[in-house]
Image (cartoon, rainbow, N blue to C red):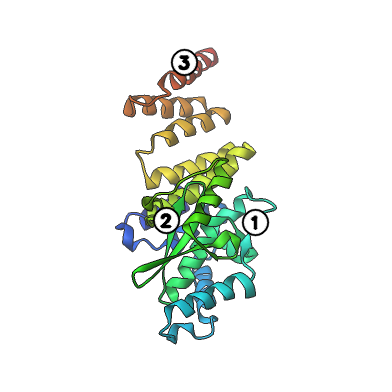
Amino acid sequence: MDPDPSLLELSALVSRPDGRIDLARAALAIARWEYPRLDADAYLERLDGLAAAVDGVRRSPDALGRLHRLREYLFVEQGFAGNRDDYYDPRNSFLNDVLDRRQGIPITLSLVLMEVGKRLGLAIEGIGLPGHFIAGARLDDSQILLDPFNGARLVTPEECEELVGSVVGRPVTLRPEHYAPVSGRQLLTRMLANLKGAYWRRQEWDRVVGAIDRLLVLDPKAAGEWRDRGVAWSNLGEVRRGLGDWERYLTEFPDAEDHETVKGHLRRARQKLAQLN
């Protein structure tokens, strides 16, 4: 089987030290899996154009003023918004679709804000709260929290706790470490986990396999991905491939809590292969 060019591209992009990963280009490499003819440079130019259109804010010495103008331009004038009608639409996780449709989920809208802000000299970072992704702008020694899914409104730590509590269904207390910026690999991993979850909900197992292939490029030691890819292969009728992933999971991650469950998967897969033979 010929290697997937978009997978090879992603692998090359994330082989760099984390701080040198081009997040926008890596996100577009993920999207090229779904859109093989995607012109990544055209979408990077789209980000450049959004930055250039923010009324000369690059020249302003007032970083806070630049930030507020950026928020207004993207989320009011350009209409970027959270997709509340179909949150689990896979298109919400592809950067090209988010730029075309001007809607997405918290992490992809945060990425747009981060990338356009970077082009304007603003230090905007991704913050992976439990169950909800936000952005944080560094201005001198302070951090301003923004919620791109909700119009990039400014949020307080107390409001962040309410947001997370509404997602997890119980009151939560967030600690300072919850507000630490995520790395580039962590952001891409979370994007792909969202995409994997969207396809899993739809039982599109071939797409689940593709998402996991990319997650394993980012972290080959992600134990659960080997297990889950075995499930996806099995659901596709690719019993030998599923068996291979489960064997690797049991061998390389002997302390996993669900060993007995996966052993059961493995036993049934072997029985099925024996019947086929």
237 with respect to 13 (left or right): right
**Element carrying mark 2:** helix
- The answer to whether marks 3 and 2 mark residues whose Cβ atoms lie closer than 8 Å is no
Comparing marks 2 and 1, which lies closer to the viewer?
A: 1
Q: Amino acid at mark 2?
A: Glu
Picture residue at 53% right of the left edge, 56% below the top: 159
Residue 207 sits in quarter: top right
Q: Earlier in the sequence, mark 1 or mark 3?
A: 1
| Crowd tier of the residue under label 3, counting other residues whose Cα lies within 10 Å: few below 14, some 14–19, many 20 or above | few
Q: Residue furthest right?
A: 85
Q: CA distance from mark 3 to mark 2?
A: 36 Å
Picture residue at 29% right of the left edge, 58% below the top: 17
Picture residue at 62% right of the left edge, 63% below the top: 81
**Element carrying mark 1:** loop
Residue 126, placed above or below residue 227 = below
The percent position of residue 191, horizontal first and vertical second, equals: 49, 51
99 with respect to 251 (left or right): right
The residue tagged 3 is 267
Residue 9: mark: 2
Residue 142, placed above or below residue 257 = below
The residue tagged 1 is 83
- The answer to whether marks 2 and 1 mark residues whose Cβ atoms lie closer than 8 Å is no
